[in-house]
Image: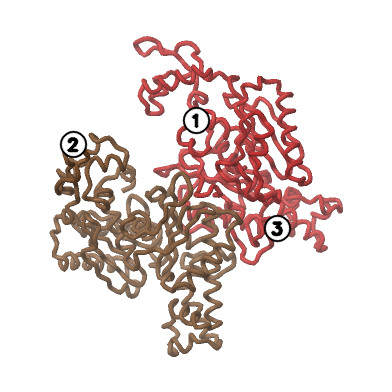
Chain colours: A brown, B red
Amino acid sequence: MRLIILEGPISRAAIAKRIGLSIPSVMTITENLIGRGLVQTVGKGKSSGGKPPELLSVVPDSEYYMGVDIGRSAIRLVILNLAQKVIFGTRIETGAVQPEEAFVNRLCTLIQSSLAEAELDVSRLAGVGVAMPGLIEGETGHVLFSPDFGWSDIPLQNWLQRKLPYPVVVENANRALALAEGKWKGAGACLGDGTGSGSRTVLCVNMGHGIGAALLQDDLLYLGSSGTSGEIGHITVCKDGPLCACGNSGCLEAVASGEAIALQGRDAVASGLPTLMSELCGGAREKIDAKLVFDAAKQGDLAALSIVDRATDYIGIALAMAINILDPDSIVLCGGLTKNGPIFFDKVCESTKKRRMRQAGRHVDICLGKLGDYGTAVGAAHVISYNGWRIPKLEHYY
Amino acid sequence: MRLIILEGPISRAAIAKRIGLSIPSVMTITENLIGRGLVQTVGKGKSSGGKPPELLSVVPDSEYYMGVDIGRSAIRLVILNLAQKVIFGTRIETGAVQPEEAFVNRLCTLIQSSLAEAELDVSRLAGVGVAMPGLIEGETGHVLFSPDFGWSDIPLQNWLQRKLPYPVVVENANRALALAEGKWKGAGACLGDGTGSGSRTVLCVNMGHGIGAALLQDDLLYLGSSGTSGEIGHITVCKDGPLCACGNSGCLEAVASGEAIALQGRDAVASGLPTLMSELCGGAREKIDAKLVFDAAKQGDLAALSIVDRATDYIGIALAMAINILDPDSIVLCGGLTKNGPIFFDKVCESTKKRRMRQAGRHVDICLGKLGDYGTAVGAAHVISYNGWRIPKLEHYY
């Protein structure tokens, strides 16, 4: 399916050659997909001597996938068609944290009003993928612990499933984003071919309100023994550092996330330090966010620069840690903090280079994600599309 | 081979059943192994109705594998036979760091005198595996950087190969140890079956003079994009901490390795603090090693306890980091520090539990390695035995 989506129209022989299956195997699989109405024949290709080969292409509107990204500041919703094209997108403010059940009701209303607005054949909706920050149990979509929302032990997938007549899968937001950024070359991933041998490892780090990550190995999500891997935001980088929303202290997230940077900016202004941040916020300290701190730093404000230097140094320590331990092929940086331009990216790269072990990770490519604000929502839809095609390696998981 | 070694005598049908291959495939493979003189038939098994099946077993002395562990304090050498039984072992002091070429000459002398002493048929020696601390380039066995020895850019495998008439492979010491501790259930690994699904991830952490680690996934070494993964000793755990042998500051190794603990003990005595360590070393500060610090801590000495608490807290931070990011099935703790008994293990587990994210790594099993001082040397020999059997998945590597 992926090959047909990305490279179609394509002949069965070309598919067989590209993925190393026999032509009879490819014929069996493609007949199944044609029978399910997902793939169609679209004319003939060039003959290489014999009969011109039949070309296959997806039927774009044969199936739809909804992805919902529950972020601390916004909820984003997209609908993709089988060709993985975004055919509908919307965004609402998350607002103050509500009781869990009220929040779930609001989410269901958003999902159903979006379906109505998109005017598509709902019987073709393969399912709804929901991306949620925090520790999510693999097969059940149970929210074990979400520091961003203060939720513990919430059967979110189950609650949504009981209210919605489509399959629902709840997945960790960073994993959804990694699927979108890393897996779909056609969907904008910026990964080179790498010079390492063996399996390809991609670490996708999401730095916004909080900080999280996910690992892909050979395009498959790395799951871990209990489904809770990738929590780079909650490694201790500063033993006696500030309290984190997770309950520990000195976590990366507590010193370097968008929220932590904003808090440090507010503290600097409150302390009466002479800083441009006071002017930029017009005296309203609560309006200071990470972007404002970066804006002041870009104009050379020393207090803001000191906050930015400290945060990017800690992020570099965390990325250097990942390089020392995993020596990945690529690290893809995503999320709100990456929107602050070269001042962020260059300082992070500089700190990473300084903090990693000399000669470690010689082939690691550090790059920016390309999908922007809707990456996680698109990834949430991918969680469903992979389920729908029943890729055997993922079957044990979904 | 592994199945025949661990469970032989075993019938072809039992092999086929256990590893999911067809009986004709198993016959082809076992005929090859019999033809190479590695496997023999050893009588008949119980009939389950038809002809009683032929049983296969390894020919223990058909092949030998030498493993050499170059440690900062000792060099250990073992010879294994095909049945993976240690048939020879020896140990010499490493002594002061010598010029690289002189060191290589000394190593070759040790290897050849050991072969003479072991009195085995040298034509059956499949090769010599050399385990070296530091960053080792995968296919070339080139020492990129070894902080313990102060070596940079030394073509160790090449130099040894030019002097020795047997195949030589140089590998990172922690990877060798992980092969021995994690891979060979029969060789003493203590891993349970785990309750996670999907691929099994085992992190083997070696804490002695320095600190390093290696990852196994489904019994295969995780290599990384440039072959330099596993360097847990050189993650920054203390941003402005003490200088490390690698050139950075605040590395785990600089605050929590055997060497770092010994240095802190010597400093405490030098500072004139009232501490039992002064008596235990009999006034000779340079005699203080990590064991002495732990011995004083076990007797309630406050200065020693403070050093031990700090070191184990940092080790816990590093293990919690590994759990947050990788959520492995098992973490196997090995090396000299683990010999200090419950005071070490309990404090490390306590800190790990405190520092990991709540609900992360619910199924992680933390346990002690079982192979003792010769584990790395045995693993170095395994590096050769795997090469000898040409397991396809490893072929790209060796």
Instruction: Find residue B161 and name its label.
Output: none
| Mark 1 surroundings: few (<14), some (14-19) or many (≥20) residues within 10 A | few
Which SS class for mark 3? helix
Give SS at disc 1.
Answer: loop
Callout 3: chain: B
Which residue is tagged 3? B307
Amino acid at circle 3: Ile
Question: According to the image, label 1 marks what residue?
Answer: B390
At label 2, counting other C-alpha atoms closer than 10 Å, the crowd grade (few under 14, some 14-19, many 20 or more) is few
Q: Residue at x 38, y 25 (%)?
A: B17
- Give whichever of discs 3 and 1 has the lower sequence position: 3
Is residue A229 or residue A371 the one in the foreground?
A371
Which residue is located at x 43 percent, y 22 percent?
A: B29
Which tag is nearer the camera, tag 2 or tag 3? 2
- Give the image location of residue B293, x and y in percent: 74, 52
Disc 1: host chain = B
Question: On the image, numbered disc 2 is attached to which residue?
Answer: A50
